[in-house]
């Protein structure tokens, strides 16, 4: 009985002092709607980053029409793959409260993998003959123009 009274007194003190009223939102459990919105915001962020990266590639290779056509085709196919996999895992005819959050988290994960993939292709390591052709003459798309004239670093055998 005394323990219950102590807890009630502590609760009243906290309410009067305003500590419970002004506690940060993170202390309260979030609703599914809030979690859905967070996931949706992450999709928007990753979509924007992906768009920005593709725009950078299009700008960098604007004079290479064949390359741009292949890039556009590859990206279109990748989007189709992403959307198909999302539909496969989270079919439209299934309903549950976390479904839109789960879909959004999956899309964000795939978008972030694509972003990492494109960024790694844009950064060709000197001497890596198997890294593909996104980096012409060893330049990084986001790097400086003088990087192609730098000699390769020496490799020591000892």
Image: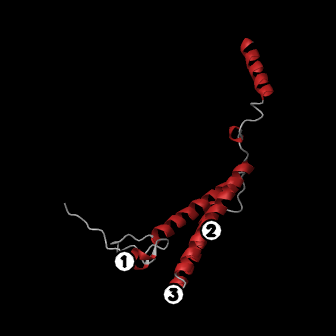
Tag in front: 1 or 3 = 1
User: Distance between the Cα atoms at labels 1 and 2?
Assistant: 42 Å
Question: Which label is found at residue 149?
Answer: 1
Image position of 7 (left or right of 118): right
| Dots 2, 3 in contact, CB < 8 A | no
Identify the residue shown where x is 79% and y is 27%. 15
User: Which corner quadrant holds the C terminus?
Assistant: bottom left
Q: Is residue 5 left or right of residue 103?
A: right
Comparing marks 2 and 3, which lies closer to the viewer? 3
Give the SS element for disc 1. helix
Dot 3: within a 10 Å radius of its alpha carbon, few (fewer than 14), some, or many (20 or more) residues?
A: few
Look at the numbered disc 3 and give the secondary structure of its residue: helix
Position in image of residue 142 (x %, y %): 50, 71
Mark 2 nearby-residue class (10 Å; few <14, some 14–19, many ≥20) = few
User: Which of these two is toward me, 66 or 101?
Assistant: 66
Which residue shows up at 55% across the image and 84% down it? Answer: 62
Residue 66, label in figure:
3
Write down the residue under mark 2. Answer: 83
Question: Real-space Cα distance between discs 2 and 3?
Answer: 26 Å
**Chain-order first, disc 2 or disc 3:** 3
Name the front one of labels 1 and 2.
1
Q: Residue at x 75, y 35 (%)?
A: 22
Q: Residue at x 80, y 26 (%)?
A: 16
Instruction: Identify the mark nearer the N-term, 1 or 3.
Output: 3
Task: Determine whether, in the image, residue 158 is placed left or right of residue 44.
Answer: left
């Amino acid at each position: 009985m005394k323990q219950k009274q102590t807890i009630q007194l502590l609760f009243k003190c906290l309410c009067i002092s305003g500590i419970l009223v002004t506690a940060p939102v993170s202390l309260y459990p979030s609703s599914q709607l809030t979690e859905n919105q967070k996931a949706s915001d992450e999709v928007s962020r990753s979509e924007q980053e992906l768009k920005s990266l593709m725009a950078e590639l299009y700008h960098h290779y604007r004079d290479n029409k064949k390359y741009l056509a292949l890039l556009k085709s590859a990206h279109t196919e990748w989007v189709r793959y992403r959307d198909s996999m999302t539909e496969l895992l989270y079919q439209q005819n299934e309903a549950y409260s976390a479904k839109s959050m789960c879909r959004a988290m999956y899309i964000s994960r795939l978008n972030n993998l694509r972003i990492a993939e494109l960024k790694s292709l844009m950064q060709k390591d000197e001497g890596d003959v198997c890294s593909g052709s996104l980096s012409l003459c060893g330049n990084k798309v986001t790097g400086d123009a003088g990087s192609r004239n730098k000699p390769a670093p020496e490799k020591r055998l000892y």
